[in-house]
Image: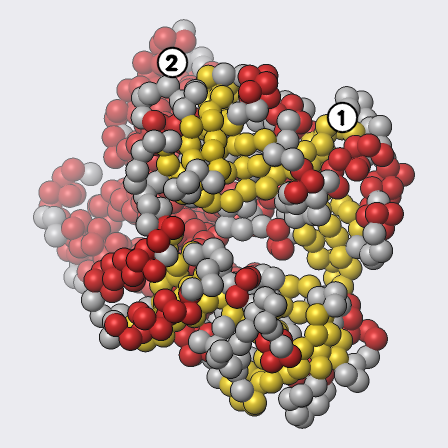
Amino acid sequence: MFVHYLKTAWRNILKDKGYSTVNIIGLSIAIACCFLLLFWIRFELSYEKCYPGSERIYRIMEEENRTDGLHYKATVRPAIDTQLKNTFPQIEYSTFTSWEELPLTIEGREGDGIMAKVLSTNEEFLRMFAYEYVEGSPESVVESHGSIISEEAARKFFGNEQAIGKTLQFGKKGDFNYTISAVVKMPENSHVTFDVLTLRDEKFYGGVHYIKLKRGAKITPDFEKQIKNFLSTTRETKNTLKLQPIRDMHLHSPKEVTDHSFGSPAQIYFFSVAVLLILLIAVINYINTSVARSLNRMKEVGVRKVFGSDRKQLVARFLLESFILSFIALLISLILVELLFPSFSEIMGTRIALKFDFGTILIAILTCLAVTVLSGGYAAFYLSSFSPMLIMKGGSKTGSKNGLRKALVGVQFFLSVSVLICTVFIYKQINAVFNAETGVDRKNIIVLETSLWYGAEDFIQVIKKENPNVVDASIALSAPYNSSYNHSGISWTGSKEGTKEMPFTQIFCDHNYANTFGLQVIQGQFIPPGLKWWGDWDESSFGLVINESFKKLMGVDNPIGLTVYYGGGYKGKIIGVVKDFNFKPLREPISPLILSFNPEASFNVYVKTTGRDKKATLDYILAKYKEMKPDYVDQPVIYHTVEDEYREMYEVELRTAGVLSAFSVISFLLVLMGIVSILSFMIEKRTKEIAVRRINGAKIRHIVRLFSRDILKVAAVVSAISIPLCYLVLNKWLQGYVYRTSLTGWIFIAIPLLIMLITLLVICIQVFLTAQKNPVASLRAE
């Protein structure tokens, strides 16, 4: 019996090749999108779960209560983890991580070396974070007091040679040596990563600290309170400690302790909704074509009922047909996933492993069954409900069927219009961010990551003099568009007590900073040249330049000469005021800012160029850098552009816009496919009517109006519903940005009109092709 049902279902699928093809293509694309997103979401949710007992590992953060809310620091002073372990018996292990990027070379070889992330930690790290050892073991590392290298870094340095026993060194004289005792596989779903790991004495290192609780130990309210107040028992401070589960680090870390490598819960919600909408559109397409085809299947249902088939058998037949279509779509979708997965991983900025494990296969089966019931269920139960007598007399419940079809077409139009409107405004907002007048000149600036370099001023003067393409250059801690060094505890002559809890940001830079980035001094002067430092400093070395927001906070017309106290004992006189500029991402408002001289905290050189002969200018700058910094002759120079850094700041927004734009195009094409399929069926069934109208003198435009009227009415109604809803959603989303694009009214109107115009064009083409046929031949065929 089952084989007979299978053969019949397969014949029916082949009989209507066009509709079957449309449904299979739509479902396969939608299911492929679902699988791609599923792999990505599983990867995002799996961060730090690769370590045994990860649910008992916590990161220690320092919490500060400021006037604008709670602020966090991930780097805590040295040995805080050891002190906690010695105090609380619930803690099994404690460790710290401190890392830096260093150019390493193989001992005995010359060359520029390779940049590597070197992680310093203690022995307990190896017990808390259990990596998969390719060579060696944690015991061998501890016994030899050696270093661990990641498998990827080992290939980079040694190729196919064995890494154990070899030594990497930093500096021409071997300032630091790292003898390899083990090779490990580095998990992709972790932020605790390294190229080389070395064991160090913790008392000299701060960094990020972790603890691991004993089995059975819980974070009770009393224990959490004791941890919270522990910092005040070691020194005089109002700051507290907070334990964050490492499983929450990737998606739920405070903004102060995240970077572009961390995930975004909002992004997961956005993409989940988008891909579910695509699946819904594909299912609606199937239902629409199934309901439309039901007119062809009524006589079949009537005949089968006359010959004894009951309703259950008919439902089983139709559901089996739907299952076959869904299963074929599922197989095609898996092929699409295999083909698209590398490009998708690159777009999402992750190296996700494509694994069809038991969980994935189970989800695939459930998806196939769900699509079968959703897409084929209505047609199965609808067709099997007719009585044989009603069918043989030519009757049907066409009113309810047409009403459902209109409702489903309306849902498709609503989803397509909504997704396209939201995508356009997301792109518009990102474009506004990149082209916003922030008060900072970001064009044609090269960034050299130099570390501490007292000779940087000489380098700047030489390249400005020798190369006409160099406009200016400056040393600084950070660029004036992503400055994160901030603290509280500030006061000034005549300030109120409450200001000490207010946060402010500080940028360390030199006298060329304003010219390099185009900052405008509106009062007083900028940092003067020739300032002294380290033992030779005087009062002028601590002169401060503030921004307009700081001046407004002070509430004085002329702040020049006033003394500001900050940073736990530092003080300086205000020498100038610069016009407000956006020194943080445009999601945040402009806040009080101090610019001051400190060459020991200025680790980057920013070189402003004309933009001409870019490669030659860059080659000159790098060659001159190595010439003037001979210790770095055999080390690679790390550089990038300001445009790259600025783009990296908005990586999440750019990725969201890119993926949503792809989803919006797919959703619109699926809607269009569905409309074409339904129209083709409608026109096919009304070929005789079109022929009669043509014989009686009807113009093509009259026939087009007849077929398009109902669909365009539905599109107009759902557009009127979609536009205000999209406005409310977008307006709320834009509240997350201090600087936001305008919700231009004509775009809300233009997108639905464009979709309706394309739909009308499709109708015109199909009607025109049918109307061009010989009416006599059409009537004969009928």
Q: Which residue sits at x=26%, y=54%?
A: 762
> Which mark, residue 667?
none
Establish if 302 lies above or below 188. Answer: above
- Residue visible at 64% across and 27% down in the picture: 123
The image quarter containing residue 576 is bottom right
Q: Quick one: 318 or 59, which is closer to the camera?
A: 59
Q: How crowded is mark 1: few (under 14 residues within 10 Å), some or many (20 or more)?
A: some
Circle 1 residue: 92
Residue 154 falls left or right of residue 728: left
Name the side, left or right, on which 332 lies relative to 490.
Answer: left
Q: Which of marks 2 and 1 is nearer the N terminus?
A: 2
Q: In which quarter of the image is the N terminus?
A: top left
Task: Examine the rendering and report whether any part of residue 372 can be seen.
Answer: no
> In this picture, is 504 found above or below 315?
below
Which residue shows up at 55% across the image and 62% down it?
601
Q: In this figure, which residue is indicated by the disc labeled 2? A: 5
Residues 225 and 460: in front is: 460
